[in-house]
Amino acid sequence: MIVDLFSRSSRRDFLRLASAGALGASLSGWLAPLAAHAAQTKRKHKSVILLWMDGGPSHKDTFDLKPGTKDGGEFKPISTSVPGIQISEHFPKVAKIMNHGAILRSMSTGEGAHGRAKVFLHTGYKEGVGGLVYPSMGSIVSKELGDPDFPLPNFVTIGNRSYGAGFLGPKHQPLNVTDPTRGVEALKPLVAEGQFSNRVGLLEDMEAGFYREYKGASINDHRTTYARAVRLMQSKEAKAFDLSLEPESGKKPYGTGRFAESCILARRLVETGVPFVEVTLGGWDTHQNNFARVKQLSEQVDPAMSGLVTDLKDRGLLDSTLVIWMGEFGRTPKINARGAQPGR
């Protein structure tokens, strides 16, 4: 897993407080400045971009190579911008920006089923525990860091649908963008603006009357969903979903293909103010033909992820954006003998 830690700025600010003498010997000497700093930090816009590698990427063929061992695999390690850290030869561009990240090799869950592992990694809870449907991390960020008055959804998924808001409700449900080049479809009303407003008003009146008569959480959920859609359609921020507005010079560093386009869209959304964006790249369940498939997938990830991190840095967004590369788990350490197409 590779991450860019926006907590670095918090640590720097903490040390700045200390060096200024705010951290005295008594609690009264430093609690007040620290509390004030915490309030200020919460007001700062922070975002997360989760690059979800669906299927479980082979850690031994990406960021945790074991060269010279029996099951080390075909790939060679290369040095990075951080002395002592080596990664796969198929990540040459990512290697150059490793000084902006960290590799976490210590996490494990013991969960070997894809479906259950995805739920666990997205929500922090095992499926079915407590009889509740728990919110995904994107929905939690939407609730804790999102602006309730922001016209765009505070949680956007690009590619496959992710896990939803659970008990947090429809306000924190993700908006799914299936194709990044098409953005959010049907954003523009098919009728004149005045006619559209009249229709929205009629719908609101009908639903208000229905709610007064029957009441119920599901009715409110329905009203919330429609209100979110209308607010998005009428917002100027919705242009963030339009990749045609991105200059070609800005797209080039990301490479080509659907994953690259998705990463560009993720950056546009974060820049506009969306606090959580999840981008999915599938195909990592490599029981067969592992090395050819991981090479092909790595060659999609390399320019897109390095381009994303570099772009965020150039725009002054990297200190406030956490970029996570992960899947539901790694793969077996041993190479499975599958004839001419060995897998993991």
Image: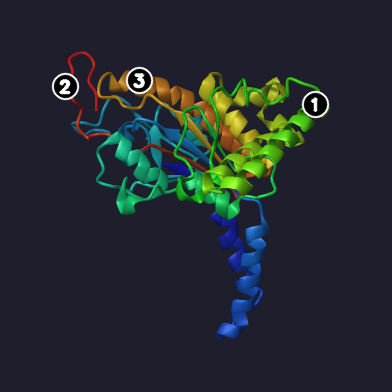
In this picture, residue 293 sits left or right of residue 267: left
Location of residue 340 (image quadrant): top left
Coordinates of residue 44 in the picture (x, y in percent):
66, 55
In this picture, residue 51 sits left or right of residue 192: left
- Residue located 47% across and 23% down the image: 300
Q: Is residue 127 visible?
A: yes
Q: Around disc 3, counting alpha carbons within 10 Å, would you say few (fewer than 14), some (14 to 19), or many (20 or more)?
A: some
Count of marks placed on residues: 3
Question: Tag 3: residue type?
Answer: Arg
Coordinates of residue 130 in the picture (x, y in percent):
32, 54
What is the distance, in whole Å, between disc 3 and disc 1 at their CAs?
52 Å
Q: Quadrant of the C terminus?
A: top left
Question: Tag 1: residue type?
Answer: Gln
Disc 2 marks which residue?
A: 337
Foreground residue among 155 and 84: 155
- Residue located 45% across and 42% down the image: 2
Q: Secondary structure at mark 3?
A: helix
Q: Earlier in the sequence, mark 3 or mark 2?
A: 3
What is the distance, in whole Å, between disc 3 and disc 2 at their CAs?
16 Å
Q: Earlier in the sequence, mark 2 or mark 1?
A: 1
Q: Is residue 85 above or below residue 178?
A: below
* Label annotation for residue 293: 3
What is the distance, in whole Å, between disc 2 and disc 1 at their CAs?
65 Å
